[in-house]
Image: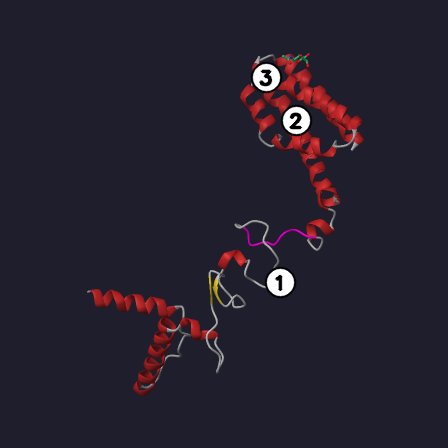
Amino acid sequence: MKLQILFALLASASAFQVAPVAKPSTSLEAETSRRAAFAGIVAGVVAPAAAFASAGESPKFSVFGIIGDGGALSEGGAYGSDQPGRGKVYSPYSVYSESGADAKWNQEGGYNGPEYIARKKAVLAETKVRLAKLPAYIEKKKWYEVKNELTRYMYETRGACTFLSKDNLERKEAQVEFFKAIEKITLNATLKNQEACQAAQEESLVKLDAFLKLV
Ligand SMILES: *[C@@H]1O[C@H](CO)[C@@H](O)[C@H](O)[C@H]1NC(C)=O
């Protein structure tokens, strides 16, 4: 029984290591291919490290990137920090090197890059769409939905506004006005104050447009 399990294990392990052998047509060929397959199994199981060695060289290997030959490949050893030319990783848990001037992110301007700013503006555009959904909820007195809408996607809104208004007093003031209008919607939804909630929703759109004009 144990022997059978061992054979099963060997067979499954070899499935990944032995190249498929063409179906033999004669019994002699079958014998040869069986032998070849068995040799493959033995080579794969006993000496995997020798697989990439060239003649005359002693085996090169790196254990976790710490012990052995640091120049050899170690699979994910020390998170790649042993690999030449990679530079220092920015965290021991990362495979990525520290961000430098050659990083694509920095080359494209980082946080001041057009792509990042466009992404934040897109958040505000979507915010407008979400705000427009509120009147339907308010009309049906779905207060839970009103507050859900204000916290679900619009969780991003505050960050986007704060980012776009940094170092700009005028924008900051417009942002505060907009946030206040949002708070009015939330509070009025809690109070189940239908008309006031609707008025606050309209106000929030006006304040958002005012903010958008500045960015
Ligand atoms: C409810 O909305 C009205 C109209 O926008 C606003 O004047 C009022 O302050 C809001 N109530 C609260 C508690 O925020």
- Contact? badges 1 and 2 (CB < 8 Å): no
State whether label 3 is within 8 Å of ligand 1.
no
Q: Nearer the viewer, residue 177 or 169?
A: 169
For disc 2, the marked residue is 131
109, above or below 26, in the image: above
For disc 3, the marked residue is 189
Foreground mark, 1 or 2, reads: 1
85, above or below 118, in the image: below
- 173 vs 190, left or right, is right
Crowding at dot 3, Cα within 10 Å, few <14 / some 14-19 / many 20+, comes out as: many
- Contact? badges 1 and 3 (CB < 8 Å): no
In the rendering, at what x and y percent does residue 215 appear?
78, 33
Looking at the rendering, the quadrant in which ligand 1 lies is: top right
- 67 vs 26, left or right, is right
- Look at 59% across and 64% down and name the residue there: 84
* Magenta region, residue range: 94-100
Is residue 151 on the magenta stretch?
no
In the rendering, at what x and y percent does residue 55 appear?
48, 82
For disc 1, the marked residue is 85
In the rendering, at what x and y percent does residue 10 appear?
31, 69
Foreground mark, 1 or 3, reads: 1
- For residue 206, what is the image quadrant? top right
